[in-house]
Amino acid sequence: MQFTLIIITIYFLTGAFAINRINHKHPEKRKENILKYITYLLLVTGMIACIQNFLLPYICFIIIYIGLYEIIKAGTNQKSFSLKTISVSILLYLLITIPFFLFSSKVQMTEQLFIYIIVFVFDGFCQITGQLAGRNKLARRISPGKTVEGLAGGLTAALVTGIAINPIVGFPIPALLIITLLICISSLAGDLLASFYKRKTGIKDYGNIIPGHGGILDRYDSFIMAGGCYYLITLFYKTLPISLS
């Protein structure tokens, strides 16, 4: 676990350096970027502490509950209210969050920690690389801020991190690479799905509960999808040409 904390510290120092570069590039967003970075640091360290102290099921229940409220609130936006849209969205949300909650309560703590670290590294480096070197839009209509360069940076950082912290879970290398890639894909899918719903309902953020980030779904959409995806992998891995142990 100490090795994991060292890795996380290195990444946050790297992130601080990147934020400084971004602030030089966009000085008008300096305060916003610093607030977002500090909040992200607190959220990540808090979540890691909760995972290590076996509190993740309680945290996930809160995330799911508030997220459902945000889905309903966005769906009942007077400018875009549609009973069909909100009904389908609630059903889809529940189908996604049930595996996520089972992930928080059924999966081993070390695996939960591994998945969360991969998610936050992928998400963080997608944003950092995208802001520093992004040129080509990844999904212009759904999430204009995402770029192909950002995705490449996030994938690279996630794969390197997965190999570095693999001792905490001990996956065979082929399984490690496949799982890390699937977690990154599901993280991106969760992010894009949440962004699509925001565009569909005409809102900018799901809320303002998290300074610099917005609502619960603005921050945890990737983790919800990735956690649920990993739980399903643990259910069906025996049918795949890999072994998790």
Image: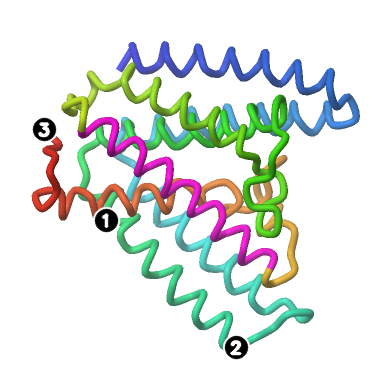
Q: Residues within 10 Å of mark 1 (few under 14, many from 20)?
A: some
Q: Which residue is mark 2?
A: 83
Determine crowd level at label 3: few under 14, some 14-19, many 20+ residues with C-alpha closer than 10 A: few
Q: Going by the image, does 210 lie left or right of 56?
A: right
SS category of the residue bearing label 2? helix
Give the mark nearer the N terminus: 2 vs 1.
2
Q: Secondary structure at mark 1?
A: helix
* Residue mark closest to the camera, 2 vs 1: 2
Q: On screen, 119 above or below 73?
A: above
Quarter of the image where one finds residue 159? top left
Instruction: Identify the residue under disc 3.
Output: 245
Which residue bears the numbered disc 1?
102
Where is residue 168 drawn, in percent x and y? 24, 22
Q: Is there a contact, CB below 8 Å, between mark 2 and mark 1?
A: no
Earlier residue among tags 2 and 3: 2
Q: CA distance from mark 3 to mark 1?
A: 20 Å
